[in-house]
Image (cartoon, helix red, strand yellow):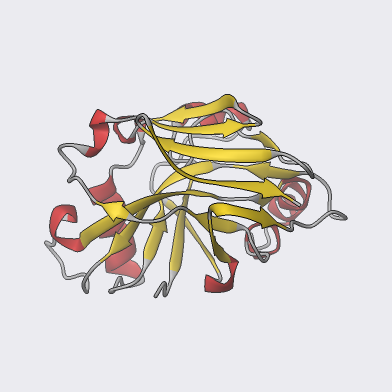
């Protein structure tokens, strides 16, 4: 059962640059409702059609297996990982950013956090051995690797755990690499880990 859904914004330098944002000096954390989570199992996803562009953002997702305590290491805290898409109402986000409002309206809508099936977490020493990819309509649009994160997985869990708490069943979307773009009705998305496809969906 998934409990809290934490997300890290601007955790890859090239993604921050492509949206004209400054590179953060500490993790930027926001949350999505657990109701936003749906399985990426060839699902047909209904996304908002009347609020401007919806963008896809492919990410590594980690699952927390036990309560965070100071000094805990990622390899002891995380038991599984998956890939997910942080769907974002980009036009809405642009407006609320200018107003200084929370991102919930742009990030927290239903079906905005589809996740593949979970696989065993290989450990921080091995998770960088594979790239993750996002295919849109069978064409690669994103490729990322945990080694390119601005804030490491350890820094992320320490930051969230110390400030907000982490417990069993919490998941963390760890940030998206460059290549984000619009998702439209009829588009298909497939998420890959190395040579293995972990999940897919179509926008309905």
Q: From the viewer's perspective, is residue 134 above or below residue 33?
A: above
Instruction: Report whether 189 appears left or right of 27.
Output: right
Q: In which quarter of the image is residue 102?
A: bottom right
Q: Name the one closer to the observer, 88 or 22.
A: 88
Q: In which quarter of the image is the N terminus?
A: bottom left
Q: Which residue lies furthest to the front in this view?
A: 42
Left or right relative to 18: residue 165: left
The residue under the point 28% across, 42% down is: 152
Q: Nearer the viewer, residue 103 or 173?
A: 173
Q: Where is residue 78 in the image (x, y as percent from the top left)?
A: 23, 59
Residue drawn at (52%, 29%) of the image: 142
Q: Give the quarter of the image for residue 197.
A: top left
Q: Is residue 90 left or right of residue 28?
A: right
Placement of 188 over or under 42, stated as above or below? above
The location of residue 201, given as percent across then percent down, is: 61, 48
**Quick check: 147 above or below 87?**
above
């Amino acid at each position: 059962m998934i409990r809290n859904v934490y997300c890290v914004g601007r955790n890859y330098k090239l993604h921050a640059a492509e949206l004209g944002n400054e590179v953060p000096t500490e993790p930027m954390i926001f949350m999505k409702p657990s109701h936003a989570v749906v399985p990426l199992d060839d699902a047909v996803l209904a996304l908002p059609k009347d609020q401007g562009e919806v963008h896809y953002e492919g990410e590594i997702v980690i699952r927390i297996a036990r309560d965070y305590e100071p000094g805990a290491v990622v390899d002891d805290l995380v038991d599984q990982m998956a890939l997910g898409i942080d769907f974002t109402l980009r036009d809405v986000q642009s407006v609320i950013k200018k107003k200084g409002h929370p991102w919930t309206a742009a990030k927290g809508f239903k079906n905005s956090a589809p996740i593949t099936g979970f696989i065993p977490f290989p450990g921080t020493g091995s998770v960088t051995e594979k790239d993750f990819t996002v295919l849109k309509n069978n064409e690669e649009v994103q490729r990322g690797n945990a080694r390119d994160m601005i804030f490491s997985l350890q820094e992320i869990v320490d930051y969230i755990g110390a400030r907000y708490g982490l417990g069993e069943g919490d998941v963390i979307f760890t940030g998206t690499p460059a290549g984000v773009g619009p998702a439209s009705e009829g588009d298909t998305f497939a998420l890959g880990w190395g040579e293995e496809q972990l999940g897919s969906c179509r926008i309905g």
